[in-house]
Amino acid sequence: MSAIPGPRAPRPRLGIVGGGQLARMTAESADALGVDVAVLAQPGDDATRGQVTDRTVVERLGPAVLQAFARCCDVVTFDHEKVRPGDVAALERAGHVVRPGLVAFTMAADKSVQRRRLDALGLPVPEFLVTDDAGAARRFAEAHGGRAVVKAARGGYDGRGVVRADRPSAAAAAAATMLRRRGTEVVVEPWLAIERELAVLVARRPGGQLVTYPVVETRQDETAICREVVAPAAIDARTAEDARRLAADVAAAVDAVGILAVELFVVDGTVVVNELAARPHNTGHLTIEACATSQFANHVRGVLDLPLGPTDLVVPAAAMANVIARGTTDPAAVDVERLVGPGGDPVVVHGYGKQARPGRKIGHVTALATDRDAARRRAVAVARGIEAATRPPAPAPAPGPAPTPAALAS
Ligand SMILES: Nc1ncnc2c1ncn2[C@@H]1O[C@H](COP(=O)(O)OP(=O)(O)O)[C@@H](O)[C@H]1O
Ligand SMILES: [Mg+2]
């Protein structure tokens, strides 16, 4: 473990717990705003390696380490939800400024707390059941046409921890596995016919001032991981207005500070809240190039209680595609010029400096254009080209004829 950062600098120092790409991009914005950043990373958090000077690496994010880190920072914020809510509460009790605070953090960290609370607040959410009983998950699926979506309450992200079960026994099995592995409750929902998935980012200051970003549309792949985000969403003005108002209501209700990402489903023409993240979010990466103020800049502004910047789109349309490694080859040598082609609208490639591993998100591509389909096509083409360069493992050679017992004996 390297040393906890030294005494406070004269510039405000923002402490980020977690050293992934969100911390990396937040640090870039903080620097531009004259704010120092200290990162408390864990060994696998390579996106901030060599990027953030004030970086401490610890094996475990235990309470003593968090307290020592917080003492060296003016404000503490997070790039993930892996800290125990009890430890966040202890930081607050010790007088540290933690943003988001305990309520928003706990909700974002636990899908069961989140669903119950949003429902209790009267905010629209899909029908759901919170349970620690796999049999109840089976019965829920039986009562909903035999299908259900089962979600681990804690520890899931990017579709890990979400299982779409196409029969009651699969729902029960998924619930049993999650309950055994993670020791928490599960959230069970009907397998919805989702018309669109939307997201709205809200940036909010401690006193309640807030701004909402234009509604974006997200697309997930068959493993439920976000692949593409397009702005503005192809929805009518009323739906957009409803979505932004709903997100602002959620942010106020959970006392969010900094960025709150509100994932929404459109089901039967109605907007409902799927889930929340109380930090910068993958659905907001395109704000770096496409909006007047990026989500990272407004996160820094919100948590430091500085005036928030405008959120308007500065281009007619933008799209972001995630780069998910297929193999372990470093894609740095990809000829992006060739993928992008000559001339045309801007395409920006963001690499996170992460070691490529199959299934790992190692970067994203943002394309700006005059229409959303053109932006989407270009972002996706470049992202897929980079993914291909990470090279999947070669397919196993076709099996030859089975050896005879005599051959095995020789
Ligand atoms: N009830 C549901 N019905 C159908 N698809 C769902 C449902 N819930 C989630 N999904 C799909 O799975 C994705 C991931 O689920 P989500 O709850 O957002 O978990 P994560 O924390 O992994 O993002 C969603 O974006 C959506 O595509
Ligand atoms: Mg999600």
Image: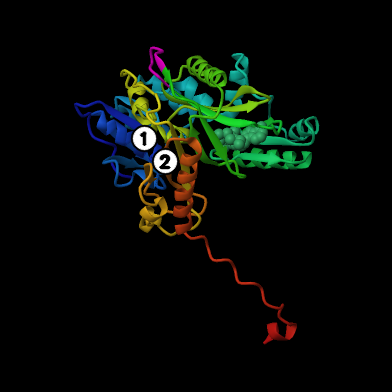
The type of residue carrying mark 1 is Glu
Task: Give left or right: position of 180 versus 46.
Answer: right
Dot 2 or dot 1, earlier in sequence: 1
Foreground: 274 or 68? Answer: 274
- Up-down relation of residue 309 to residue 79 (above or below): above
Q: Which mark is residue 366?
A: 2
Count the marks: how many? 2
Taking the image as drawn, is residue 183 in sight?
A: no
Q: Mark 2 and mark 1: span between their CA atoms?
A: 8 Å
Residue segment shown in magenta: 203-210
- Dot 1: element: helix
Mark 2 Cα-neighbour bin, 10 Å: few <14, some 14–19, many ≥20: many
Q: Are marks 2 and 1 in contact (CB under 8 Å)?
A: yes
Residue farthest top in this picture: 207
Residue at mark 1? 289
Q: Position of residue 153 (x, y in %)?
A: 60, 32
- Up-down relation of residue 90 to residue 284 (above or below): above
Ligand 2 sits in quadrant: top right
